[in-house]
Amino acid sequence: MMTLLAGVVVIGARRGVAGLVAGLGALLAWVMINIVAGVEPLLGLFLGAATGFGLAMLAKYINTIPAFQTSSEMVSLALGSVGGLILGLGLVAALSLGFPTRQNPTTGKFFYPSDSLPNWIYDGVNQSVIQTSLSKGRGNGGLGIWSSSKTIRAFLLPDRNR
C-alpha cells in the first residue's frame, strides 16, 4: 500500500500543477461515479471513462497556461505532490476496505473482514494498521469510517452504502 501511495505521489509531483488538478478532480468525481455506478453500473463505467478523459484534457490544458509555466519548479513539484497524496490516500483507503464483510443475521452487525477469507488474507487485513485506523471508532483513535457520513461511505464503501 505504501508503494502505491508513493507511486501516486511521484506521478502527481512529475505532473506539477496538472497533477494537483487531476488529483482533486478525480477525488471529486470519485464520489459521484460511485453513486451513479451503484444505480447503473454501465453508466458508471462510461462516466468514469469520460471523466478520466476530461481530467486528462484539463491537465494538458493547465500546462499551457503561462502563469503555471513560469512558476518555480519547487512550487510545481509541491502542488503536484499534494494532488498525488490526496488521490493516493483515497486509493489506499479504498483498497484497505475493499474485502468482503460478514453480517451476523441475529444482531445485524457486520464484521470486517469476513472470516470466510483464507486465513493468510484474513490475518493480513485484520492486522493491517491502515484498516484498523480507518475502522476503529472515533473514540478509540480511529476514523470510524463504517459509521461516517453517506458521502464518505460513497467514496470508500460504495457497495455498503445502501
Image (cartoon, rainbow, N blue to C red):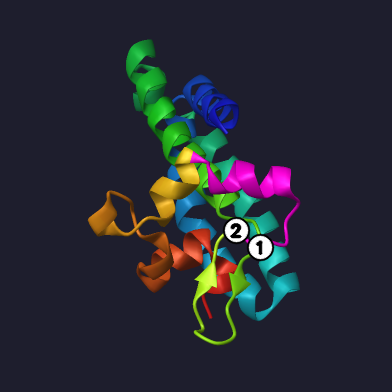
Whether residue 72 is visible, yes or no, is: no
> x, y percentage for residue 26?
52, 49
Camera-nearest residue between 12 and 18: 12
> x, y percentage for residue 16?
45, 24
- The residue to which callout 2 is attached is 113
Residue located at (60% from left, 58% from top)? 113
- The quadrant of the picture occupied by the N terminus is top right
Camera-nearest residue between 157 and 74: 157
Asked if residue 51 is positioned above or below residue 4 in the image, the reply reads below
Residue located at (47% from left, 22% from top)? 13
Camera-nearest residue between 121 and 66: 121
- Is 153 magenta? The answer is no
Secondary structure, mark 1, is loop
> x, y percentage for residue 80?
43, 27
Stretch in magenta: 113-128
Q: Are marks 2 and 1 in contact (CB under 8 Å)?
A: yes
Q: Residues within 10 Å of mark 1 (few under 14, many from 20)?
A: some
Residue type at the position of mark 2:
Pro
Earlier in the chain: of badge 2 and badge 1, it is 1
Give the residue at the far bottom of this rendering. 106
Residue type at the position of mark 1:
Pro
Camera-nearest residue between 37 and 129: 129
Q: Residues within 10 Å of mark 2 (few under 14, many from 20)?
A: many
